[in-house]
Amino acid sequence: MSKKIFFITFFLTCILLQTFGQGFNKYRREELWSFSVQGGPSQYFGDLYALWQYKEGVQPDYYAGFSTRYTFGTNLKARGDVGYYKISGQDDHADPNSGRIPRNLNFRSENWEAALLIEYYWKPVKKFNINRAFFNPYVFLGLGASTIDPHTNYNNNWVALRPLRTENELYNNVVVIMPMGLGIKYKVNLYLDVFVEGNYRFTFSDYLDDVSAFNVSGFYDELIEDYISGVNPDRLRLSVREERFLLPNGEPNIELIRSTRGSARRGSGDPRLNEPGARYDGYFTLSAGAEINFSYGFWRNWILQGRSRTFRNW
């Protein structure tokens, strides 16, 4: 009888240990994968906007994105981003100190981006589920690509600028970007974090806004030829929009453009932007998001049990 009691007790003890072990396991497992959605305002920086130098006020647009992360080090995560954003700029808000004379230029661009990044967290992230830090600041750096598709408002219509070669340059519609920034995360529960981050993208292009050249002196003859022949008159119309180079009817003043040898301005005029590397455009996003940590416990104890509760309620 005592042997039977011993085996029964041993058997029940094993079952209880296994049960409690599995229940507590959801708190102990490391969260290797996570996914997030985020969004917020975006801000362009280039020939038609220069907040850093002249405090011209914020001119925000929007950004929305999706990210996936993989924890591979004590304080490190690898991250992949896909996002959609809008940027825009115009001469209207130019600070007089910037040297940006009114060129009557404007643009907007709605683009896709993708990037791979490395995140470094102040507090360890390769930890058991329940021990994740409540507040965890982080920094990140990466490399990626973005489409560019600038349009301008001309006679109340949005016209694509890249096909027109307004500066006689058919620039690439995909550019290299280098995102970098910082953020902070807050743990809401075992599986959910919320975060806020600022992300500036350095680019290797000066054509996010379709403006790079200081003036049209190097290619005004070709612009005029296309205008007079009627092959592509919009090239000159949208390259030269400074009011003093326009006729009363709004068309380009051919004789004045020729006599001044193409001095109609396009670039910002800021001497600090004359060096090749200093002329690249960029954009910034300030986003808030929610991140779900897809640990074993998330699927077993949240999704599946939540579905079971739903069926039982029916």
Image (spheres, grey):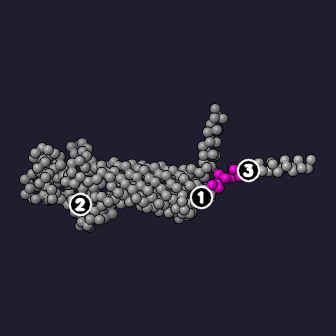
* Residue picked out by circle 3: 18
Residue 112 lies in the magenta stretch:
no
Residue 24 lies in the magenta stretch:
yes
Q: Which quadrant of the figure contains the C terminus?
A: top right
Q: Which one is closest to the eye, mark 2 or mark 3?
A: 3
| Image coords of residue 244 (percent x, y) | 13, 54
Q: Tell me which secondary structure the magenta stretch mostly adopts.
A: helix
> First in sequence: mark 1 or mark 2?
1
Indicate the amino acid at tag 3: Gln
Give left or right: position of 182 versus 312: left
Q: Which residue range is magenta in the image?
A: 18-29
Q: Which one is closest to the eye, mark 3 or mark 1?
A: 3
* Residue picked out by circle 1: 132
| Up/down of 15 relative to 121, above or below | above
* Residue picked out by circle 2: 268
> First in sequence: mark 3 or mark 1?
3
**Rendering quarter of residue 232:** top left
CB atoms at circles 1 and 2 under 8 Å apart?
Answer: no
